[in-house]
Amino acid sequence: MDAFAVAFGFVAVSTAVSGGALLLTHRATLSAVLLVCAGAAGLVADALLAADRDRSGAVALAAAVSLFGPAALVTFPRPRWRHPVDFVGVVVVVGGGAIGTAYAGVDVGVVGLMGLLQGCAVLAHTWWRIEVSADRERRAVIWMALALLLATIFYFFASFSAEGFDSGTLPSIGTAAFALVAPAMYVGATLPDLVDVRALVVRTVVHSVALVTVMAVFVLALGLLEAVGATELNVGAQALLAALCSTIHHPTCVVLRGVVDQLLFGQRPDPLGAASAVADRIGAGPVMALRAIRDALVIPYAALLVDGVLLASTGTATTHTRSLDLDGAGELVVGLRPGDLGFSRGDEQVLGLTVPLLAQTVRARALAEQLIESRGHTIAAVEEERRRLRRELHDGLGPRLSGVAFTSDAARNLIRTDPAAAEEMVTQLRADTVIAIEEIRRMVYAMRPPALDELGLVPALRQQAVGLRNREGLSVTVDVSAPAHFPDLPAAVEVAAYRIVTEALTNVARHSTSASASVRLHPAADGLRLEVTDHGGHTDSWRPGVGMASMRERATELGGSLEAGPGPSGGRVSALLPLT
């Protein structure tokens, strides 16, 4: 059995096995059946050729190559029988295969012409399918095209280098390369996202054309040297000439990559214009911002992640991506174009101008969400306070005032007939009125301590600290210090500062053995800073309780912060309350 029969048998086995595996997946069923038929016919042809049955073997070979194989390529992965291009492609391929089979072993020229016609039809149809197919189907077709491209290139180089070797060895090895086609079709139909196949196609085309260019320059240089009389070059001279010719490989790849990139993606805008276009659209929302970046850089994919969670994305995810940090506000993930290992200098300039804008947009969005959430909490707190006041008025003060009204009516009715009973009712009426007044004062104090309006924050705190005693019953001296010219504070800050300080002093009285404490109030540019410290040991550990939670909530509601815990010489509560 010669080398060609072995190579062809290898291709037939690969085709039949891949077709069978594809048939089991229930995908591209028609192409899978045709691949199995092509592989089986190829094995029959290989057996007939091995048995020296030239005529029968040639007919079977022509049937395998010219009929089933191209038909499988044209119908992969899903034929559209009603579409004119698909219909014409199938007719041309099947008709050419049938004619080629009929003339197998009779007229080599007709067989060759039909093979050329089929090849052109498969090439044109594959290109058209790549242009019009949906994304997943397009990647499947590109997998097939990549395998055909690699096999054809390998066969070309093997045939080109065949001189000086056994007549059929290298072409047979080149033929064996077509065993890649059927497995590539299986991968395209089942695992189209295994790698970025478009990048592989671009690299294959670029490096193959660059290699052909180097070879053409080398052959041209040899021809020129022979023309000037250098008919025989030794090995060293040929090696030197080959090395010189190889220096154009990398520049050719760079130029070709730019050409192929422009053919696939069009002309890129200049960095400043692209950045301006992004700046005009970046505030419209994350999706619009990502689309603007995609349009500017002509990239297949862009996504925005915040805290590792996908916030927005546009385009189709690619295998090769690059992540850019948005100054802690999030992460921008962009997909590289097929064939690119990184971004060009112009792309880097666009990203350098647009990433800070996107970071500001993300940060502004986060602040807006925080504002909405804070407003929601504020509304909920206001509604909760209204509910509490309504409940206290309805369940407490309301019945008491109703009782006062009923008692006054009864006293008026008895004032002439039973003065003693009327006097007793008036006494009860006064007691109920005093209780109602106390309840009103308690409710007013719960909303805003009257001392703040009567005295101001600092004097009200000093008044509150008078008579404070610790858990051992000893008097606690409290030093309240503040600037002489204490500024006017927003009402919410005044109430929060008063409540935090009084709660901290209450904790000193309950849990500390200190005989003294200090309160420091310091208005600063970033807000009102207050600190309450004592100078004694705490009998209890600092466990979060209702009072601690209340102080922290009051600071957080204003956008501030609070720290509480044991200090170097005693307990310490420190808070920052923003003034705006």
Image: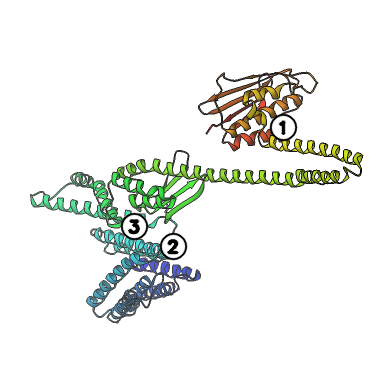
On screen, residue 373 versus residue 248, left or right, reads right
- Residue at the location (43% across, 47% down)? 333
Determine the secondary structure under disc 2.
helix
Residue 266 point in image, percent of width and height: 28, 55
Can you name the residue that lies furthest to the bottom here? Answer: 102
On screen, residue 183 versus residue 557, left or right, reads left
Q: Is residue 493 above or below residue 151?
A: above
Q: Earlier in the sequence, mark 1 or mark 2?
A: 2
Q: Which mark is residue 187?
A: 2
Residue 186 point in image, percent of width and height: 44, 65
Q: Which mark is residue 201?
A: 3
Q: Quadrant of residue 75?
A: bottom left
Whether residue 52 is visible to the viewer of this picture, yes or no, is no
Quarter of the N terminus within the rendering? bottom left
Q: Are marks 3 and 2 in contact (CB under 8 Å)?
A: no
Amino acid type at circle 2 is Val
Q: Which mark is residue 126?
A: none
Q: CA distance from mark 3 to mark 2?
A: 15 Å
Q: CA distance from mark 3 to mark 1?
A: 65 Å
Residue 216 point in image, percent of width and height: 19, 54
Q: Earlier in the sequence, mark 3 or mark 1?
A: 3
Q: Which mark is residue 543?
A: 1
Determine the secondary structure under disc 3.
helix
Q: Earlier in the sequence, mark 3 or mark 2?
A: 2
Amino acid type at circle 3 is Val
